Image: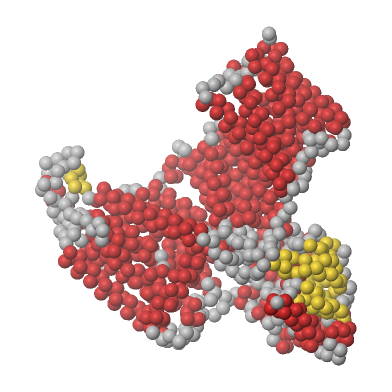
């Protein structure tokens, strides 16, 4: 469903992402893990056609993310890491706008907006200006924007970041439900317990390079036999660090 | 410790003001090699440019102040004396007894004597005191109109967490606002000019500064009281709306303050005579007296009184502020959207009626305009206020009277307001999305279509201004003249074209993700837009229909070319490092055409300067040099940039293309011969035929020019680049017609119609064969036939 082949992005001399090659099958929940600044958001932005790859390509449903960006977005719901909204617009109005822009009639967009706001527990805040929302509410509204056109693929940048424990739990529940209905989910996170609970496969990115990819059990077996995901993560991201540091010292 | 806190706070403010100021003039730097940079590096040039701009500002304010004083003296410093009636004169100027030695100027005008202790007469002093009061009001309003008031965060909330006492904090705030705000910039120049005029030449600036500081401190205190009070009691939404009103009022007051510098008919001068004496006991009057005083003793007393009054103001103000903040520094609630959920629920159940005229994007934009007064004011009201205030204050409203006599001015005014509004609306299309741009980017719609809808909306909205003005003119003059109708067409077509230009330039000239609002617009693109808009004003004042049409077609093509460039750029909009691959586009064609004609003119000019006559051979040389240079430069540029879609001259199927060309050329030439026959029987182009530059003596040269050089160069530009560029994004018919139109426009009017036909034929052949050899052959055949026919008709 999602394919990356040699995908890379550089800003001048700085290499943000280097030679990413992996794929996510239809119906998978793929967790993209990595420390801050590892290149998770850059990768997701390339999947969304916001950034142009410096090398390689990425495709969703067989469509090139850069060349067929409009078609790709018909199939994808996207949640950025820090969703910002227009001032002076109510949450419901923003959601309706997004629905209409996806080609829904005004009536359908309104019905979908009301349903999603209810599902996400935003019904009480539906008539407030979205700039006044708390971080967690903004994240939920962003999620509603991603879900309103019932996409087959969800690309979520840190979906539970900034949510309180109950809200985080609800969002996870919602994502599990979406996955059960056959949606493909690509989510980036650095919350390991959530990754452990939600994801069927994981990829770990460090300093722009993919350092491990596979099902959780397989990763545990290969990287730290019998260890937790935390140990796997620390080992995978530390090896590089150590190598770099020794390189720097020499 | 208290001093240190004040110094730190002021330092922070100054640093911030400086950063903002220089940021607007810096080029953005792409991330430096090898590392990520959170903030863009500083350009060394920023300081220089910032300094130059500051210098220019100081200069223009001082210049206005000087001119204002000159006008005060001219209008109020003299009196028209009835011949041999000194008694009457004494009565009028009781406050300022006339100097008996004053020599009557031109018999009837007498310079009034200075008021006691001053070098200026009483009337001029009254005007100066009034001007100072207006400037003080302007300084206060300008500071309140600033963006600081509408920021959702209130920095007092943060400053109150620092380990500094509240009194200290308030004092520091007032001092800081005295020094950093707009107060000193607005107040110092006029006071300095007054001091200079009173004879304090070296001391003029220090004196002006010394008198301005207490006034600025009063303005800062009042401002702090007002903005604290508003923060505490008014919701942010209302605050934004209030701020919008204040910004309008501040512009009107500023214009009022500037007006005596531009005309002696200013309201300030008219009101000056009724300024009461107690005005000189208020701070602005005291400041005026202090700097304009010629006697040191009374000047010092005025200074002391001014300082005392300012101190009282600041101390009382600070006490009031302490009272305001006695319940803590907490801003009034969040931006409310006063509407209950239940009400909306019931509203939502109501069936949706009516078809939608507007796309979702346009509907959203209008909804924002309706809710956000600041947005409304900044886009649609500001242009009217700025232009209107200029007109009303300087021309005292006689513009509309003149509308009947000179509708060109009215048309220019209408277009000017619309173009200004477009700069604030269509140009900002991407910026107004700001950080919410991700929503548009995640939608299955090309950004181009969204921009197109917005350009359409703004074009339509901004048409309202000129349309209203024309309707007004039609009512006032009691009918619609042909001239007015022509102007209306020029302006009403121009506004949509400039909506497109503004939107396209906005794509390059804006950075919607920049954190600092000032950084979101790149000034060079704003200037480019203003330059282009002023070019169009020529179309309004142009004398012939031909010139108007030419300018309009060229502007429309330019708008289209810019749109094409912007469209190529859009997919790379949010990518800081990638840029679109080079492709031959319409803008290349327009650049080439421009270069071609400018070079021709320059080479011909060289001959003329050498004292030579412009003969056929000179024209040929100019044509070949210009064409050759353009051709080579464009090819070089395309090769360097590795551009895609460079038009090919030769390729597979040369013979077939040439055959098409010869056939098509013959058809076009036949049309031209019929046209020549027809116009030979009319007197329409009599003069043009007489003034033909060519004679039989130029024979060989003319043939070489017409049959070899012209086809090669012109076909490369007009078919290869312009038609090819148009065809990239437009349908065949429109591209053929538009490229033929511009091709005809650059020829002399007499030849325009047959050349238009040739343009159509050549474009069709190029569209079919994809090789320039085809249209080149057509052009050569056409020119050979037409020139040959002329030879025959001239005879041996």
Report how many numbered discs are placed on residues in the image.
0
Residue depicted at 81% across the width and 31% down the height: B774
Left-right relation of B269 to B160: left
Is there any visible trace of residue B460 in the rendered image?
A: no
Q: Quadrant of residue A144?
A: bottom right
**Front-most of residues B600 and A44:** B600
Residue depicted at 67% across the width and 77% down the height: A138
Left-right relation of B480 to A182: left
Q: Quadrant of residue B52?
A: bottom left
- Please state, as top left, top right, bottom left or bottom right, where the N terminus of chain B lies in the image: bottom left
Residue B120 image point, x, y percent: 21, 55
Residue depicted at 77% across the width and 81% down the height: A239
Residue B472 image point, x, y percent: 51, 45
**Front-most of residues B378 and A190:** A190
Q: Residue furthest top?
A: B796
Left-right relation of B652 to B379: right
- Please state, as top left, top right, bottom left or bottom right, where the C terminus of chain B lies in the image: top right
Is there any visible trace of residue B113 in the rendered image?
A: yes
Q: Quadrant of residue B612?
A: top right
Q: Residue furthest front?
A: A250
Colour basis = secondary structure
Left-right relation of B105 to A211: left
**Front-most of residues A161 and B355:** A161
Residue depicted at 39% across the width and 60% down the height: B253
Residue B543 image point, x, y percent: 53, 32
Residue B545 image point, x, y percent: 58, 32
């Amino acid at each position: 469903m999602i394919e990356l082949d040699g995908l890379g992005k550089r800003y001048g001399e700085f290499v943000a992402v280097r030679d990413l090659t992996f794929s996510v099958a239809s119906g998978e929940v793929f967790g993209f893990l990595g420390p801050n600044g590892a290149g998770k958001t850059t990768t997701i932005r390339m999947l969304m056609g916001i950034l142009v790859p410096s090398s390689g390509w990425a495709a969703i449903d067989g469509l090139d993310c850069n060349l067929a960006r409009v078609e790709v977005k018909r199939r994808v719901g996207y949640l950025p890491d820090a969703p910002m909204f227009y001032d002076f617009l109510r949450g419901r109005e923003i959601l309706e706008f997004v629905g209409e822009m996806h080609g829904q009639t005004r009536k359908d967009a309104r019905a979908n907006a009301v349903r999603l706001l209810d599902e996400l527990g935003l019904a009480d805040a539906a008539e407030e200006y979205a700039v006044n929302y708390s971080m967690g509410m903004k994240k939920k509204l962003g999620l509603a924007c991603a879900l309103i056109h019932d996409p087959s693929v969800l690309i979520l940048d840190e979906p539970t970041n900034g949510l309180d424990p109950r809200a985080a739990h609800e969002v996870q529940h919602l994502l599990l439900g979406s996955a059960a209905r056959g949606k493909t989910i690509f989510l980036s996170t650095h919350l390991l317990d959530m990754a452990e609970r939600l994801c069927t496969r994981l990829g770990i990115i460090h300093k722009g390079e993919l350092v491990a990819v596979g099902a959780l059990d397989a990763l545990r077996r290969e990287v730290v036999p019998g260890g937790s995901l935390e140990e796997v993560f620390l080992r995978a991201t530390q090896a590089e660090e150590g190598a770099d540091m020794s390189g720097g010292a020499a | 410790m208290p001093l240190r806190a004040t110094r730190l706070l002021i330092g922070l403010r100054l640093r911030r003001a400086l950063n903002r100021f220089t940021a607007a003039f810096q080029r953005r730097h792409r991330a430096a090699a090898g590392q990520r940079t959170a903030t863009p590096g500083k350009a060394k040039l920023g300081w220089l440019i910032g300094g130059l701009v500051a210098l220019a500002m100081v200069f223009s304010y001082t210049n206005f102040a000087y001119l204002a004083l000159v006008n005060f003296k001219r209008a109020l410093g003299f009196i028209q004396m009835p011949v041999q009636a000194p008694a009457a004169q004494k009565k009028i100027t009781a406050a300022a007894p006339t100097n008996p030695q004053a020599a009557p100027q031109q018999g009837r005008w007498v310079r009034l004597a200075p008021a006691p202790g001053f070098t200026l007469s009483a009337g001029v002093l009254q005007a100066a005191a009034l001007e100072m009061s207006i400037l003080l009001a302007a300084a206060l309003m300008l500071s309140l109109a600033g963006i600081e008031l509408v920021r959702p965060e209130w920095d007092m909330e943060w400053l109150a967490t620092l380990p500094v006492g509240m009194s200290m904090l308030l004092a520091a705030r007032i001092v800081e606002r005295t020094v950093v705000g707009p107060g000193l910039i607005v107040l110092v120049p006029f006071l300095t000019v007054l001091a200079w005029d009173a004879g304090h030449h070296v001391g003029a600036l220090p004196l002006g500064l010394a008198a301005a500081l207490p006034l600025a401190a009063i303005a800062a205190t009042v401002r702090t009281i007002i903005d604290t009070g508003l923060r505490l009691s008014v919701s942010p939404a209302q605050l934004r709306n209030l701020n919008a009103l204040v910004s309008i009022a501040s512009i009107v007051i500023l214009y009022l303050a500037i007006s005596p510098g531009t005309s002696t008919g200013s309201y300030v001068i008219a009101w000056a005579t009724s300024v009461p004496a107690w005005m000189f006991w208020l701070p602005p009057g005291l400041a005026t007296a202090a700097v304009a005083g010629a006697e040191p003793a009374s000047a010092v007393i005025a200074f002391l009184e001014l300082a005392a009054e300012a101190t009282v103001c600041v101390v009382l103000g600070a006490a009031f502020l302490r009272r305001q903040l006695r319940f803590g520094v907490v801003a009034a609630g969040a931006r409310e959207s006063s509407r209950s959920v239940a009400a909306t629920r019931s509203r939502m159940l109501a069936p949706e009626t009516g078809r939608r005229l507007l796309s979702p994007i346009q509907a959203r934009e209008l909804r924002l305009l309706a809710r956000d007064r600041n947005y409304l004011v900044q886009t649609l009201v500001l242009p009217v206020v700025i232009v209107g205030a200029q007109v009303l204050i300087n021309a005292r409203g006689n513009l509309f009277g003149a509308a009947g006599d000179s509708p060109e001015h009215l048309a220019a005014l209408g277009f000017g307001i619309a173009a200004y509004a477009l700069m604030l609306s269509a140009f900002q299309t991407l910026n107004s999305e700001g950080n919410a741009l991700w929503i548009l980017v995640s939608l299955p719609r090309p950004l181009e279509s969204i921009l197109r809808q917005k350009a359409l909306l703004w074009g339509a909205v901004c048409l309202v201004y000129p349309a209203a003005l024309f309707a007004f003119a039609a009512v006032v003059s009691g009918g619609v003249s042909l001239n007015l109708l022509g102007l209306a067409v020029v302006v009403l077509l121009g506004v949509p074209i400039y909506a497109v230009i503004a939107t396209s330039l906005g794509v390059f000239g804006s950075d919607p993700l920049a954190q600092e609002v000032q950084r979101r617009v790149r000034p060079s693109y704003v200037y480019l837009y203003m330059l282009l808009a002023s070019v169009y004003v020529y179309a309004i004042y142009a004398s012939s229909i031909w010139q108007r049409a030419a300018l309009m077609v060229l502007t429309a093509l330019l708008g289209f070319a810019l749109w094409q460039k912007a469209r190529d750029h859009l997919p790379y909009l949010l990518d800081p490092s990638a840029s679109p691959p080079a492709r031959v586009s319409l803008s290349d064609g327009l650049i080439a055409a421009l270069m071609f004609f400018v070079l021709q003119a320059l080479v011909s000019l060289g001959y003329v300067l050498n004292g030579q006559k412009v003969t056929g051979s000179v024209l040929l040389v100019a044509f070949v040099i210009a064409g050759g240079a353009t051709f080579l430069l464009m090819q070089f540029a395309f090769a360097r940039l590795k551009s895609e879609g460079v038009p090919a001259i030769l390729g597979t199927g040369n013979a077939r293309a040439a055959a098409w060309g010869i056939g098509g050329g013959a058809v076009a030439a036949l049309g031209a011969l019929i046209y020549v026959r027809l116009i030979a029987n009319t007197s329409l182009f009599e003069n043009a035929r007489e003034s033909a530059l060519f004679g039989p003596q130029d024979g060989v040269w003319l043939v070489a020019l017409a049959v070899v050089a012209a086809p090669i160069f012109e076909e490369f530009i007009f078919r290869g680049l312009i038609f090819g560029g148009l065809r990239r994004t437009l349908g065949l018919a429109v591209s053929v017609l538009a490229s033929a139109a511009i091709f005809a426009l650059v020829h002399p009017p007499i030849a325009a119609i047959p050349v238009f036909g040739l343009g159509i034929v050549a474009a069709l052949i190029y569209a079919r064969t994809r090789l320039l050899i085809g249209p080149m052959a057509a052009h050569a055949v056409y020119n050979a036939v037409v020139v040959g026919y002329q030879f025959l008709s001239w005879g041996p």
